Each structure stands twice: as structure tokens, then as C-alpha cells.
Image (cartoon, grey):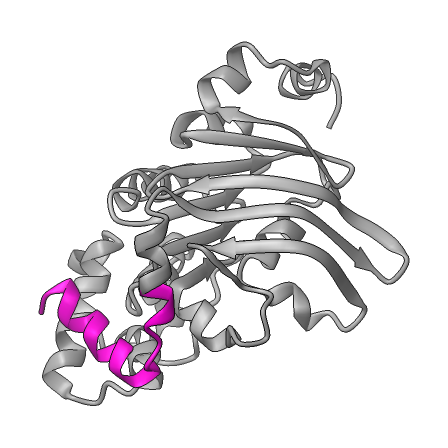
Amino acid sequence: MSLLTVKENISMVNNDTSVVSAARRDEQIVFDTKDLNLWYGETHALKDINLKINEKEVTAIIGPSGCGKSTYLKTLNRMVELVPIVRTTGEIMYKGRSILDKSFKVEDLRTHVGMVFQKPNPFPKSIYDNIAYGPRIHGIRNKKVLDEIVEKSLRGAYIWDEVKDRLKENAYGLSGGQQQRLCIARTLAIEPDVILMDEPTSALDPKSTLKIEDLVQELKKDYSIIIVTHNMQQAARISDRTAFFLNGEVVEFDKTDKIFTKPEDNRTEDYISGRFG
């Protein structure tokens, strides 16, 4: 099955053509955050965030614990709204359309913006059903089509050869690194435009971490990836651009090699050189 065919299936179910037309108007910028502020109750967690995220690049977000990295990431698919005391101002544009507009259904947004979490979180189902879950939610029922999506997604996450003879087995039987790649494959199954990754390797061993990093480099050919990481070496290895967050603010955002070799702000240099954080 071609990529277009799967997207057509999902598109027909969602009947959401506005995102596609908006994409044609702005091919380069996938997310444009303008003057974003966020409060958890009285706590001002994000302060005047202005970031433009390019398509088909890896954007790393670095900074010490509690600086707003994960909070910002979760605004991009509106998961942060699950916290009842959250309040936001400003604007987040996804391919020319405001994701905070009430007309933009959160279900549609999360079809286009997938997420991989810090700890692998497979469903308590078979490997096959983990991958087929999303497409089924979007109305795809044909067994042959589902088989093709499952194989394509598992191949895309570089885990097909390891699990192709175990598809009916429970996903909990996989190793931690395999579970994380399964979760990436589950995200790929609905063919999003953007993949958000929140510390995706922090719970993994070095060998599994390397596999995920190699996978990210392959995925950026087809997807825009935004990754939160505490591992500055990882950010330097895999990202095209890096944003340094501190106390809820973006201190500096630039090409990764510049951030790590010639940062403009002394606070950036102090952080990446290990003077704090």
C-alpha cells in the first residue's frame, strides 16, 4: 500500500481538508509559536515563547529540569490541556492554522502530530493490535489494508525483522528498546506529519539508545521531529536545530552546530559546558 492510499483512508474518515490546504500555503514551517505564555495555576511555566519549527528536520529542546521543555512539547498536540489548571495565551500555528482555535478538533490535531513518551507505553495487546489500533480508530477495517499498515509501520521503526514471527504475542514480552520502537511504529501507523519525542531514550540502555537515534535520522526524511532531551551529546548528534530553554524562556535557538560551538548567550555556553544544570 502506498503512503497516499493510507492517508486517503484516514482523510476520508476525518473529512479534514483544511489542514492540507493550509500546508500548501506554508511548506517550510510546520509549527510557528508566537508569544506563547502558559500558567499552571499561578505558576508562569512558559514565557513569551517564539519558535519556528522547520519541516523534515530534527529540532532538539534542551535545558535543565523544570525549565519548560516538556510543557512546551505538550502544547504542540494540546496534551497539556489535560491538566485542569492550565491557562495559555498567544498562538501556535500548525501549517498556517491555529491549533488553539476551537474549530481545530484535538483528535484531528493528534492525527497529524504523534507523540512518543519517555517510557515505552505499549498497549496490553498483541504486537499486531498495538499497530493496528490507530488505523482502526480512523475507520480502517480491511484486514489486508491493516496487514500492510502494520508491516510498513514496523519496517519504518526498524523492528519488523525482530517481531514479524511474533505479531500475535503480547507487546509486553518485548525488551524495553523494542517496546519503544514499537511505540514509534504505532505512531507511524497513522502517518503523522510531526513526531514529538519526550526523552525517548532516557529509560533505555546505550545499545537501544543508539538504535533509536539511528531511527530518528531515518525518520526525518519523511517526518518533522521535535525531541526533548537532557542528553546534550544526543542533541548534538541527531538534531538540525536546538532550542535552549531556561526558566520557561527560550534563551537561544539556532542551528545545532552553532549552539554547541558558538552560542551567542553566555547562559547557553554555561549550560552546555556543564557549569549548571
244 versus 218 height, above or below:
above
Q: Residue at x 34, y 67 (%)?
A: 186
**Left or right: 272 as drawn, with respect to 67:** left
Answer whether residue 168 is visible to the viewer in this image. Answer: no
Residue at horizontal 49 percent and vertical 16 percent from the top: 258
Residue 16 colored in magenta in the image: yes
Q: Nearer the viewer, residue 30 or 266?
A: 30
Image quadrant holding the N terminus, namely bottom left
Relative to the observer, which residue lies in front, 269 or 194? 194
Left or right of 267 on screen, residue 229: left
Picture quarter containing residue 48? top right
- How far from the left and from the top, in percent, is residue 243? 57, 32
Determine the image quadrant of residue 266: top right
Q: Is 137 located above or below residue 122 in the figure?
A: below
Residue found at x 46% / y 38%: 59
Q: In the rendered structure, does residue 30 fall within the stretch colored magenta?
A: no
Point out the image quarter for the C terminus.
Answer: top right
Count up the numbered dots: 0
Q: Which residues are magenta?
A: 1-20
Give above or below for 111 relative to 225.
below
Q: Position of residue 246 (x, y in %)?
A: 73, 33
Can the viewer see residue 208?
A: yes
